[in-house]
Amino acid sequence: MTQAHTPATPGDTQTARQSPGRRLASIDALRGLVMVLMLLDHLRETWIVLVPMPDPVDARTVMPALAIARFAASFCAPVFVALTGLAAYLYARSHTPGETAGFLVKRGLLLMAIDVVYLSPLYWGVVPQPTFWLQVIWCLGLCMILLAALIRLPRPAHIALGLVLVCGHNLLDPIRLHQGDTLFPLWALVHQRDVIALPFGFIAKTTYPILPWLGVMLLGHAIGPWFGHDVSPTMRVRRLVRLGVGMIGGFVVLRLLNVYGDAPWYVVKGSGVRTVISFLSMTKYPPSLLFLLPTLGGGALILALLEMRSGSWLIEKLAVFGAAPMFFYLFHLTVLRLLYHGALAWWGPTSGSVFMVDGYGWVIGWYVALIMPLYYPTAWFSRLKQRRRDIAWLRFF
């Protein structure tokens, strides 16, 4: 794909026509890489769905392969949220602030509705109680609505607020509210991962509290000028490398100090591998400062690499996933749920009332087997979006 664009986030086809295809292809390729890594994590959730697993993982007991895969998947949400902020900036280059805000609000409401109306019911019948899973799509939509409210603020304000939210939200960790407290539902949505009781026996799980994620989106929006026509590719790569190295370096220093940003790591006697796992196991729900530093820093370095390697076969294939990420997201989750229920019906439950595989090798096998079958429908939809630009709703997927 030589003229990739960013339709799943506010970077629509008009932005694609006004920006160099190479640059946007690198953004789509990074988003596509996130999609491919996400598939592995969702396969783990599908086939080992009820295995007790604390967060962060216990380095003393977790399977090393699972810990490695989890760390790789950790890049998905931070990079995707940051790219959403960047895409909002690219969209605003060819639209007024009012048009940009309106698009963000409509897009955000659609994402929140998809999470509640479509994605949550996919899990009903697997978990014992009907649950609305307020996960990454819900969080992304709500953050887009908040970004719409902040879109007219100057860039320094976006940077300052983003840094405060990303770097300072762990100071709020000691604040814990409980069911019955007046502000508990709001606090569970904002910062405290928890369960909210709803009428008629339903519950809502706030898997992705929005406070730090809004900071990530604001910072992604703030690097938008690096992708302007007046910035040379060499300068853009240099800035991305400096940013990535700085964030990873900051992570190493803070993690070694063990004083702020996440639960302390520890040495596992007799196992260097498990000690490294402990060092790299950070809190994702909500994402700690030490979770965001290496994932966002690594994302910046990967984007710089993709910028330098533009036009390669691999980048073009990854860009296919990245050009239609919402389609891929909904499609692959639907396929995984159908596969799960098919396995449950065919083989019956293997643990209690659920079907689970007995080893992580099965997850890797399914991952390899599904990449190409999922690629071709996504490529078809991506081509449809480019061919039928007159169909406005396609840009949302």
Image (spheres, helix red, strand yellow):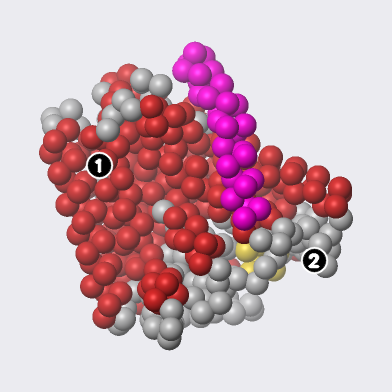
Region of the chain picked out in magenta, as a range: 361-390
Residue 133 screen position, x and y as percent: 64, 57
Asked whether residue 365 is drawn in magenta, I would say: yes
Residue 120 screen position, x and y as percent: 68, 51
344, 17: nearer the viewer: 344
Residue at which label 2 appears: 351
- At mark 1, the secondary structure is helix
Q: Is residue 375 above or below residue 276?
A: above
- Quarter where residue 277 is shown: bottom left
| C-alpha separation, residue under disc 2 versus residue under disc 1 | 45 Å
Is the stretch drawn in magenta largely helix, strand or loop? helix
Q: Measuring 52% from the left and 72% from the top, which residue is drawn there? A: 57
Q: Measuring 29% from the left and 55% from the top, which residue is drawn there? A: 297
Q: How many labels does the image show?
A: 2
Q: Is residue 92 above or below residue 83?
A: above
Q: What residue type is labelled 2?
A: Ser
Q: Measuring 27% from the left and 41% from the top, which residue is drawn there? A: 305
Q: Nearer the viewer, mark 2 or mark 1?
A: 2
Residue 364 placement, left or right of 298: right
127, 211: nearer the viewer: 127
Residue at which label 1 appears: 304
- Residue 286 in sight in this render: no
Residue 227 placement, left or right of 202: left
Q: What residue type is labelled 1?
A: Ala
Please tell me the numbered disc located at residue 33. Answer: none
Q: Measuring 41% from the left and 54% from the top, which residue is drawn there? A: 75
Residue 26 screen position, x and y as percent: 32, 33
Q: Which of marks 2 and 1 is nearer the N terminus?
A: 1
